[in-house]
Each structure stands twice: as C-alpha cells, then as structure tokens.
C-alpha cells in the first residue's frame, strides 16, 4: 500500500468515526458522486467495521444532473417524487447517520436557464423540509467531507494535468483534515479541542453586537440574540452522540438576530452557488434584510438564490475563522464552500441553526421567529475574511472589545 493509499483509508476512517461517528446497529446513508466510488467503498468498509447495520448509498453525478437541466421536460423542476422524499424522511426519522461526499464541479450548471435552477431549488427545498430541519437540529449525526473529482481538481489547479491536479488536491485535502499518516482520529480530536478554546471565550463575552470593517468595503453591524451559543469543532446530536458535521472545520460560529444586520458586506472569495460561480459580489442590508445584491459574475443566480423564500434574504450564521489558519495559509482557492468557508470569516444567508440558541432545538417555529432565528430553505455561506478585517464586539454594558484585528483573533 502506498503512503497515499494508507492516508485515504485513514481519512475514510476519520469521517466515519469522528465525522458521523457511526454507532453499532445504526444505518449510514452515504451520498457520493459516482466518480468517487473508490472512496465510498473505503467509507463503507470503515462503517461496517464499526458495527454499522447497513450502508445505504445515494449516488450523484454532475454530468447526468447537467443533462437533466438541459434536456428534461420543463415541469419536472417543479416537483420532487414522493419516493425520494420518503428516502430522506424515513432514514432521518429512524435516526440513520448521513455522510455526504461533496466534490461538485463548481461550474457544473454554468449557463443553465436560471429559472429551472430556481424552481428546482424551491421544489426540493419544500419537499425535503422535514429532513433538512432534522439535520439543522442535529437530530441525526451528519458529516460533509470532500475528495477530489477531476472537474473540480482542474478548476482548482488549471495549470496542472488532470492527474497531477487530482493528486495535488488529495494532498491539500488530507493536510487540511490533519491526516498525516499518524493517528488521524487523535489529531482531529486535538484540533477540535483547540477550536473549543475560542468557542469558550466568545461564549464568555456574550456580545450583544459585532461590528465588521475592512478596506474591501465591508462595514456591517449585527446583533446576536440573547441566549446565543457559539459552537465549533465537535458537536452532539439530540440523541447525545458526538459528531463533526464538517471535516475539515476551522470555524467558530453562532446565529445572528435575523432583523439586526445593517450596512454593507463584501465577499472576498467567489462562491459556487447552484453549479455557478458568483464572483465579486456584495450585499447591502437594512434591518436584517438584503436590499441590494451586486455581483461581477453570476448576479442573476445570486438574486434568485436570495429570493427563493422570505428567509433567504436574511442572515442565519456568523462565523469566525482566522486569516492565519491552515487552509487560508495554503493559498489555494478551492471553489468549494466546505474548504473556502474554513479559510475565511463568513456569514450565511438563509436558515439559522436552532441549536445555536439556548433551548432552540425544542422551540416552536413561532418562538424561534420571535427570538430572531432565521428560517429558510437556503443556507449558503459566503466568505468575507481578509488580512485587514476588524471585528469589534460590544458587550451588553456597552464596552467595545477587539475580537479580530488584522484578520486574526486578538485573544
Ligand atoms: Zn459556517
Ligand atoms: Zn454555514
């Protein structure tokens, strides 16, 4: 076995053990692009070894998906078949774990009729609402990780041959996930504990407001609701099982009061959104609502995304990631939100995680709304970190505390 093959096996074990943390007798839903089947098999082997009851596979393919958007009959984008809804509902209801291997070509739907994309987003958002809510409330363990696919690797490393680009992307992914040939599960646990330190400090400050500013043009204030909880690293399902929803992760995050954001926020990295790259974009927000969205590229897709429902034009997450951190320092632009969000401070438009509010998991929709917790079928992180980003926290006593200076945590 070559060194890389060993590390791929270690990585599969990591996402199965520390990622979804599959339990004896539990089913695992494995969502994977067909191109990455080799890695899916490694994950399945690790899952069965850990006592998994059954691995249920859900295959995906960018090219078939693109063909559907190009050639299928128009009304198929307005509904989702009941068997597909049933698949996600019944497995999440029984408490299966969900592992998604995300390796999408960031431009897989480039040039597709935006109206088809918007209608498909809305119909699947509505049909899979119960499933999505269970995931957002951590009723099941879930994890998203990535392995290289050719089209994605070539987008990241356009000057390399396909083979070299895939090999290089494997190295970047494994390094960012602390898979170094040693004990990957222990490395991950240590990293997760490290993230907790900043989580604890942010929770102790219990800021009322965060103020963001940088030379790119971000000038934003946003309030955090009373009872907000900063999270990061390992989390716990409502059934009490620890898991890591993202591998890699570097972020410390919470939810904002949905009606409180005011000012301008400028993205500092492109965003792959619904198979299209959005570049050079910014939002103007007033009382929480995005009132203006501009983009140099992909503006129509961006506007459609924030218009799929009422909550899509409000924020649901604020996350802190030091500019000086491993993925950011790699200098690689991944065109994959799992990596780019963990190289940069970010905000999400759309749904908030109810678990980021004390007691939020058991609140009704009306209670959550009253507490300023955003609700939407979207949850899309966009990156706003920069080398000069300043974030200042304002406490409930009105004291101003530097949180980020020159792109990094002050403490
Ligand atoms: Zn995040
Ligand atoms: Zn997010």
Image (spheres, grey):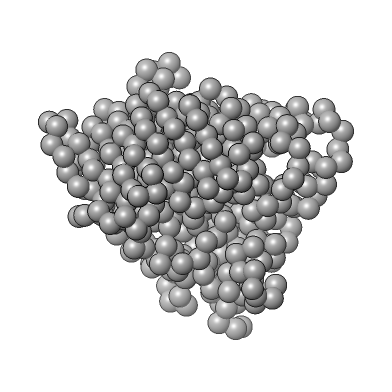
Can the viewer see residue 25 in this picture?
no
- At x 40%, y 25%, the residue is 286
Please tell me in which quadrant of the rendered image residue 189 appears: bottom left
Residue furthest to the bottom in view is 2
Q: Quadrant of the N terminus?
A: bottom right
- How far from the left and from the top, in percent, is residue 317? 41, 38
Q: Is residue 340 visible?
A: yes
Q: Between 84 and 290, which is closer to the camera in this rendering?
A: 290
Left or right side of 195 for 335: right
Q: Residue at x 44, y 63 (%)?
A: 327
Q: Residue at x 75, y 52 (%)?
A: 61
Q: What x and y, as percent, mark residue 185?
A: 43, 65
Q: Is residue 26 above or below residue 150?
A: above
Percent x, y of residue 212 = 31, 42
Quadrant where the C terminus is found in the figure: bottom left
The one of 39 and 285 positioned closer to us in this rendering: 285
- Give the quadrant of residue 255: top left
- In the image, taking residue 331 as reference, residue 304 lies left or right, namely right
The tally of labels here is 0
What residue appears at the point 23 percent right and 32 percent down from the top-left corner? 208
Residue 106 or residue 197, whichever sits in front: 106
Q: Position of residue 40 (x, y in %)?
A: 65, 60
- Residue 67 vs residue 50, the one in the foreground: 67
Q: Quadrant of residue 284?
A: top left
């Amino acid at each position: 076995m070559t060194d890389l093959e060993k590390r791929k096996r270690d990585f599969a074990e990591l996402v199965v053990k520390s990622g979804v943390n599959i339990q004896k007798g539990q089913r695992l839903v494995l969502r994977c692009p067909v191109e990455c089947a080799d890695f899916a098999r490694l994950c399945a082997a690790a899952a069965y070894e850990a006592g998994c009851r059954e691995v249920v596979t859900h295959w995906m393919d960018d090219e078939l998906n693109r063909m559907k958007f190009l050639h299928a009959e128009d009304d198929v984008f307005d509904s989702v078949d009941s068997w597909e809804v049933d698949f996600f509902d019944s497995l999440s209801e029984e408490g299966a774990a969900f592992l998604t291997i995300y390796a999408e070509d960031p431009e897989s739907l480039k040039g597709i009729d935006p109206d088809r994309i918007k209608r498909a987003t809305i119909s699947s958002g509505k049909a899979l609402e119960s499933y999505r809510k269970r995931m957002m409330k951590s009723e099941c363990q879930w994890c998203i990780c990535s392995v290289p696919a050719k089209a994605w690797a070539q987008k990241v490393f356009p000057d390399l041959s396909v083979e070299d680009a895939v090999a290089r992307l494997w190295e970047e992914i494994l390094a960012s996930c602390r898979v170094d040939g040693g004990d990957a599960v222990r490395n991950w646990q240590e990293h997760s504990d490290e993230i907790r330190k900043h989580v604890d400090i942010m929770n102790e400050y219990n800021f009322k407001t965060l103020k963001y500013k940088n030379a790119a043009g971000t000038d934003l204030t946003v309030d955090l609701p009373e009872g907000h909880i900063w999270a990061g690293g390992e989390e716990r399902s409502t059934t009490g099982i620890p898991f890591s929803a993202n591998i890699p992760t570097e972020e410390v995050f919470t939810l904002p009061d949905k009606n409180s954001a005011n000012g301008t926020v400028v993205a500092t990295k492109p965003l792959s959104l619904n198979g299209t790259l959005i570049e050079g974009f910014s939002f103007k927000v007033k009382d929480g609502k995005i009132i203006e969205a501009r983009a140099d590229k992909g503006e129509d897709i961006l506007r459609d995304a924030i218009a799929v429902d009422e909550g899509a034009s409000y924020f649901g997450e604020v996350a802190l990631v030091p500019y000086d951190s491993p993925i950011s320092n790699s200098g690689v632009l991944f065109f994959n939100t799992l990596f780019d969000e963990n190289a940069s401070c970010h905000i999400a438009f759309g749904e908030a995680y109810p678990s980021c509010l004390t007691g939020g998991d058991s609140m009704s929709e009306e209670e959550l709304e009253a507490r300023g917790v955003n609700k939407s079928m979207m949850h899309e992180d966009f990156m706003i970190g920069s080398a000069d980003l300043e974030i200042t926290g304002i406490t409930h006593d009105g004291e101003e505390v530097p949180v980020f200076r020159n792109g990094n945590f002050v403490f």
